[in-house]
Amino acid sequence: MKTLIKPLFVAFALVLSTSYASLAKPTNDPQPATFQSGIFTNKAGKLQVALDKQTGQPLQIRLTSADGRMVFSQRVSKKQTTVRLVFDVSELPDGAYQLTITDGKETNQHTVTLETQKPMDVNRLVAIN
């Protein structure tokens, strides 16, 4: 009888531990980023935005001025995985702008400063001997 009790006790403990493990609530581990963004300017002075994202989560891209006025807004569908945008900012007045990319959980904000450079006078001295 002693030899029968020990294996039954071990089997019962194993069944009990696996049932508790299956009933345990999942932990709220931080999810990996669902998108990555790259923002840069090209030689023509245009602002380029490159986004790579996972499917299943839509994105919202907004460019707002310092006073909160929305200049540009675009929604990226949840089926798209790559987005490449080019902003022609030559018509916008000088100042600070906020580029916001969000998926509802994670938000990336980038400050874009537009500044018109004043033309410089180039003085050349040409001498002939």
Image: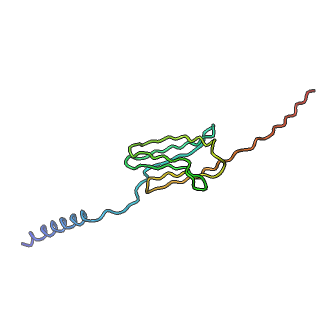
The residue closer to the viewer here, 84 or 26, is: 84
In the picture, measured across the screen, residue 17 lies left or right of residue 96, that is left
Residue 129 placement (x, y as % from top left): 93, 26
Q: Residue at x 44, y 45 (%)?
A: 76
Q: Residue at x 46, y 56 (%)?
A: 106
Residue 33's place in the image compared with 21, above or below, is above
Q: Quadrant of the N terminus?
A: bottom left
Residue furthest to the top in view is: 129
Q: Residue at x 51, y 48 (%)?
A: 73
The image quarter in which residue 126 lies: top right
In the picture, measured across the screen, residue 6 lies left or right of residue 85, that is left
Residue furthest to the front in view is: 69
Residue 11 placement (x, y as % from top left): 15, 65
Residue 13's place in the image compared with 113, above or below, is below
Q: Residue at x 18, y 68 (%)?
A: 13
In the picture, measured across the screen, residue 48 lies left or right of residue 10, that is right
Residue 45 placement (x, y as % from top left): 63, 40
Q: How many marks?
A: 0
Residue 14 placement (x, y as % from top left): 19, 65
Which colouring convention does the figure follow? rainbow
Residue furthest to the left in view is: 1
